[in-house]
Amino acid sequence: MAISVVGHANPDTDSVTSAISLAALLTAQGKEAKACMQIAAADLNPESTTVLKRFGLQAPEFLNDAAGKEIALVDFSDLAQGPAGLDSADLVAIVDHHKIGDVTTNNPILFRAEPVGCTGTVLNKMYKEAGVAIPKDIAGGMLAAILSDTVNFKSPTCTEDDKVAVAELKVVAGVDDTDELFMEMLKAKSAVEGIPAKDLLFRDYKDFDMKGSKVGVGQLELATLDQVAAVREDLIKAMKEVKADGRHSVLLMLTDVVKEGTDLVVLSDDEALIEKAFDAKLEGGSMWIPGMMSRKKQTVPNLQKAFGC
């Protein structure tokens, strides 16, 4: 049975390319593996689609049920972010860069999680440690993922390890100008015209368990907040629909990459708790938080503290 390597729901570029990268590494080490994701290729976000096309990578295959399968996880370790049946799958490996989630196993597994900006950075180390050369196309995908996750090194999640990985991977991938690559990805990622509001909300979205309360956090990285001005009310309507499905709060980070800050749109059963989490006041259902670029490092930890996790 081939190992199915899969990233989190609503996959971003790191989740997609890390599945491809780890599957290739496992295969090179003599283990049959295939890259998977929890959506169809046609539903990939614009940035990931752009990256796969630029580097000639094939989209991972669709996986909607993990039950009874050998599974490796990349870029997450929370049951809520995995495919159906994950709790009854044979979990054999996890490679991640987030907090440790609630996945458990009956036997010891390969578990590699590091406090870096991107799973691709961890995988770059794993290839080197294994003495396996990274194929050019896969190096391109890993490079793009690191630039995306670290917002071209602007995110507080960025580490020296990420910068070292980019310097190494750009050579293998044959990319001279990483700024140009990042801007190509940002142009694709921030495109909103003609896209349904709910699709925009779920473009980069995750649910979290905050001490028994379900909290959803989405993020749109934009060149300017003006890009979503015309669809703001539609986004809020979509947030209300998602919140009505049993969530305590739904937050949408509208992140201005140029100004390096986030307009945090909030729908919550307890607005005072959210205000406390970020030491800011909501005005018209949102708050501007300068310097906020990262959901992982600046949004989720503040919420966890506020909820008493």
Image (cartoon, rainbow, N blue to C red):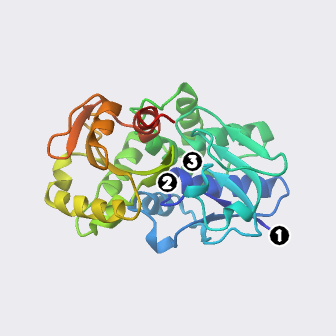
Q: Which amino acid does label 3 sit on?
A: Met
Which amino acid is tagged 1?
Answer: Met
In this orientation, which residue lies closer to the viewer: 54 or 236?
236
Left or right, 126 with reference to 162 = right
Provide residue 207's location: percent of width, then percent of height.
47, 53
Give x and y (percent) for residue 287: 22, 38
- Contact between marks 1 and 2 (CB within 8 A): the answer is no
The answer for how far apart the CA atoms under marks 1 and 2 are is: 26 Å
Residues under labels 2 and 3: Cα distance? Answer: 9 Å
- Whichever of callouts 2 and 3 sits on the residue coming sooner in the sequence is 2
Task: Examine the rendering and report whether any part of residue 148 can be seen.
Answer: yes
| Disc assigned to residue 142 | 3
**Amino acid type assigned to the residue bearing label 2 in the image:** Thr
Count how many numbered circles sit on residues in the image: 3
The earlier-in-sequence mark between 1 and 2 is 1
Mark sitting on residue 13: 2
Task: Judge from the rendering whether residue 261 lies leftward or rightward of residue 22; answer left or right.
Answer: left
Quadrant of the rendering where the N terminus is positioned: bottom right
Q: Quadrant of residue 131?
A: top right
Q: Which residue shows up at 79% across the image and 67% down it?
A: 2
Answer few, some or many: residues within 10 Å of disc 2's Cα (few below 14, many 20 plus, some between 14 and 19): many
Which element carries disc 2, helix, strand or loop?
helix
Q: In this view, does 134 lie to the left or right of 212?
A: right
Residue to which mark 1 is pinned = 1
Q: Is mark 1 on a helix, strand or loop?
A: loop
Q: Residue 237: which disc?
A: none
Is any part of residue 259 visible from this angle? no
User: Dots 2 and 3: beta carbons under 8 Å?
Assistant: no
